[in-house]
Image (cartoon, helix red, strand yellow):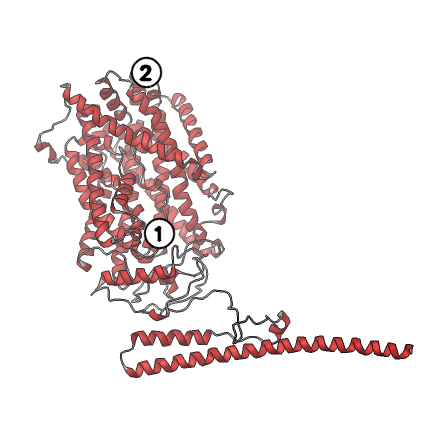
């Protein structure tokens, strides 16, 4: 959580990740290498965010990180990969949970993400206020100020100053995040990765100089020591450290061989992330005595102690100011990202019209200012606790509960989709069939629930800081209840206010809605969700092209040949060039008749020619209105049915029937062409007769005039 409390600690929450772009819907495009995906994952996850918190455990933290990686990171990555490869339309976890469980859990996920970011940065305001002294060279005064409580007359003006800074960042974020992309990029590098690299090098110098190691480094120290549930409370933060791997799951479609490359990328990402977390945590534990560890300023103490090994104890000051750049980058990104996503879904009918606005920069400014207002309220909760460190610990645990609840919903949706949409093509499947799915998702659910339970126990290491256990739990429960009630109220209000739907929103309907179901239910269709969504009107509007829930096309059976089904589905989508099925601009899609897919044609009317290939003149609007031209929709439908039957024919009789339908379609086409030709000829004849009549009348008048004159 320290990234929220101060930018110098690095890392970034999943909420703040830049939105991922959709590649071609067809998996296996090969635009992304395994190494590139690994680096993307590590960038999302790695940092010093929870290292101070976990350093309380010393070498035991290594064990906790390994357990968290195996029990949470791997299941989350594998499940997110399957969901993204099967339902890759706009929305991420909103799409996945909505497909598997329903609308209310889906919008709740986005609200949880929005509130999680709000709580994270709301807690950052008082913690940054408490560490203001570290922006100076007066280190001892800075430690004293951060450690002790102060009168509101002292803390309030400082908090107001930081609030002004946050509101300024929010205002800048409403101007468009692209303007600050470079700042965000360099902020993460200079505020996260540079400090980690420097302290790693200086830790080696520290050891070589013979300085005392402040934690037990014996192998036996790897074994956790049981002292009641409260001694494990901070371990819940380990799961939070690994949260966010789902953000890059959408890129699985850009891998050449997703079934092989993605698990490898997840495994390598986990190893590298573990190294970064473990190295940072162990270094802090080696340098700072356990009893002196403080969530607010221990990182600065680590910088100062290690800097002293090279005669530069004021190193903390350098990283403190670099942390401001990271803080700025994180604020800009996080204030924009979750609000932008929630705003997008909100225009599908889930937010009041007042919060759906986009300013001229395309940003949901009102929603962002609302988020900043809630952050301001969160910041003042600090006055109900003994000190800021207890406040930081409390908010961290509340955020962990929210985020782990978010992932429980994702795991449940994954399992339900294995049963409700068993034939839907997925570019990647969790290995082991249904048994493998239950094992992977079951481990993830149990780990998440265990982390949630742990988070309700006040940490034994911080009893004095968090106050009584009752106060601790009451505030956490109040925050969680506020989020739950907000989710319920917004959802119930959205069902009453149908006018909240913006017809121009960019979210495609859920697959089960397109298939005429009232809620996620059993559907045996094997048509890719991207194709089902293509050309549909946005979510909240009437379904434009209904599909049957059991409608099938010619694809391999996923039970017998899952890889073959995925490759065939990918080829079908690539043939149509479907890149973002929920984008209303993708309406010129023609279904593949050889696969038995219904035709979705929105192309302009063809230009008709005569037998010599010359373009026929177009009749006037009046002529066309007087004699409507028949369409060839019936012919197209018959031809599609014919070609589908030819592909799937099991007997000569069916082939003959298909050929007859094909002949009928050709005859209908010729008839339509003949009728059109007659209409054109009649229109031309009418125009010629009209012109001829005008000429004759003029000549007669002239003759009469001549005769009279003679």
Image coordinates of residue 365 in percent, x first then y, are 47, 41
Classed neighbour count for the residue bearing mark 1: other residues with Cα under 10 Å, few (<14), some (14–19), many (≥20): many
Classed neighbour count for the residue bearing mark 2: other residues with Cα under 10 Å, few (<14), some (14–19), many (≥20): few
Q: State the mark number for residue 138.
A: 2
> Judging from the image, what secondary structure is the residue with disc 2 in?
loop
The residue at 13%/19% (across/down) is 210
Disc 2 and disc 1: Cα gap in Å?
A: 51 Å
Closer to the eye: label 2 or 1: 1
The quadrant in which residue 568 appears is bottom left
| Quadrant where the N terminus is found in the figure | top left
Which residue in the protein does label 1 denote?
A: 23
Which mark sits nearer the N-terminus, 2 or 1?
A: 1
Say left or right for 359 vs 270.
right
Residue 211 at least partly seen: no
The residue at 48%/79% (across/down) is 670
From this view, report whether residue 44 is shown above or below residue 22: above
Q: Residue furthest right?
A: 710
From this view, report whether residue 411 is shown above or below residue 313: below
From this view, report whether residue 618 is shown above or below residue 227: below
Image coordinates of residue 545 in percent, x first then y, are 42, 66
Using the image as rendered, state which of residue 91 and residue 454 is in the foreground: 91
The residue at 23%/46% (across/down) is 265
């Amino acid at each position: 959580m320290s990234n929220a409390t101060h930018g110098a600690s690095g890392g970034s929450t999943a909420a703040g990740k830049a939105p991922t772009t959709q590649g071609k819907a067809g998996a296996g495009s090969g635009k992304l290498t395994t190494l590139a995906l690994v680096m993307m994952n590590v960038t999302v996850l790695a940092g010093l965010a929870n290292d101070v918190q976990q350093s309380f455990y010393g070498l035991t933290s290594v064990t906790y990180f390994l357990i968290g990686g195996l029990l949470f990171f791997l299941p989350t990555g594998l499940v997110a990969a399957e969901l993204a490869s099967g339902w890759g339309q706009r929305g991420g976890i909103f799409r996945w949970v909505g497909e598997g469980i329903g609308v209310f859990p889906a919008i709740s996920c986005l609200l949880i993400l929005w509130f999680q970011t709000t709580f994270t940065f709301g807690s950052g305001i008082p913690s940054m206020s408490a560490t203001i002294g570290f922006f100076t060279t007066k280190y001892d005064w800075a430690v004293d100020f951060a450690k002790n409580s102060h009168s509101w007359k002292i803390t309030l003006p400082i908090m107001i100053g930081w609030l002004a800074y946050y509101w300024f960042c929010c205002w800048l974020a409403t101007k468009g995040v692209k303007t600050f992309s470079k700042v965000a990029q360099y902020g993460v590098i200079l505020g996260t990765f540079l400090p980690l690299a420097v302290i790693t090098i200086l830790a080696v110098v520290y050891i070589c100089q013979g300085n005392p190691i402040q934690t037990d480094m014996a192998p036996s120290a790897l074994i956790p020591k049981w002292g009641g549930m409260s001694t494990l409370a901070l371990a819940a933060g380990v799961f939070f450290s690994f949260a966010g791997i789902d953000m890059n799951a959408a890129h699985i479609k850009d891998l050449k061989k997703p079934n092989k490359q993605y698990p490898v990328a997840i495994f390598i990402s986990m190893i590298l992330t573990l190294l970064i977390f473990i190295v940072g945590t162990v270094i802090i534990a080696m340098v700072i005595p356990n009893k002196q560890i403080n969530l607010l300023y221990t990182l600065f103490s680590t910088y100062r102690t290690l800097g002293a090994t090279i005669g530069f104890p004021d190193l903390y000051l350098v990283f403190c100011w670099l942390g401001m750049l990271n803080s700025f980058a994180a604020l800009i990104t996080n204030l924009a990202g979750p609000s932008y996503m929630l705003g997008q879904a909100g225009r599908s009918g889930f937010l009041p019209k007042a919060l759906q606005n986009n300013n001229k920069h395309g940003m949901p400014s009102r929603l962002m200012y609302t988020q900043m207002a809630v952050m301001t309220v969160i910041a003042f909760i600090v006055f109900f606790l003994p000190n800021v460190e207890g406040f930081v610990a409390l908010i961290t645990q509340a955020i962990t509960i929210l985020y782990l609840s978010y992932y429980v919903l994702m795991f449940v949706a994954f399992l339900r989709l294995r049963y409700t949409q068993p034939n839907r093509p997925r570019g990647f499947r969790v290995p082991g069939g249904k048994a493998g799915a239950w094992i992977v998702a079951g481990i993830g659910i149990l780990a998440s629930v265990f982390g949630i339970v742990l988070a309700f126990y006040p940490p034994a290491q911080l009893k004095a800081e968090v106050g009584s256990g009752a106060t601790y739990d009451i505030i956490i429960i109040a925050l969680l209840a506020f989020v739950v009630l907000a989710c319920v109220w917004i959802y119930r209000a959205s069902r009453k206010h149908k006018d909240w739907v913006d017809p121009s929103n960019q979210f495609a309907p859920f697959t089960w809605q397109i298939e005429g179901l009232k809620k996620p239910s059993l559907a045996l269709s094997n048509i890719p969700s991207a194709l089902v969504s293509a050309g549909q009107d946005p979510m909240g509007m009437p379904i434009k092209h209904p599909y049957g829930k059991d409608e099938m096309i010619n694809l391999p059976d996923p039970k017998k040949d899952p890889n073959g089904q995925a490759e065939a589905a990918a080829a079908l989508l690539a043939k149509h060039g479907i890149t973002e099925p929920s984008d209303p601009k993708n309406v010129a899609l023609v279904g593949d008749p050889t696969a038995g897919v219904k035709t979705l044609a929105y192309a302009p009317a063809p230009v008709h020619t005569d037998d010599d290939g010359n373009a026929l003149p177009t009749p006037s609007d009046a002529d066309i209105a007087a004699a409507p031209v028949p369409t060839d929709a019936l012919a197209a439908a018959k031809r599609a049915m014919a070609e589908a039957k030819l592909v799937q024919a099991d007997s000569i009789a069916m082939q003959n029937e298909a050929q007859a339908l094909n002949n009928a379609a050709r005859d209908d086409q010729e008839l339509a062409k003949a009728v059109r030709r007659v209409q054109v000829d009649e229109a031309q004849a009418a125009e010629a007769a009209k012109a001829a009549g005008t000429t004759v009348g003029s000549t007669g008048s002239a003759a009469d005039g001549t005769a009279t004159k003679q």
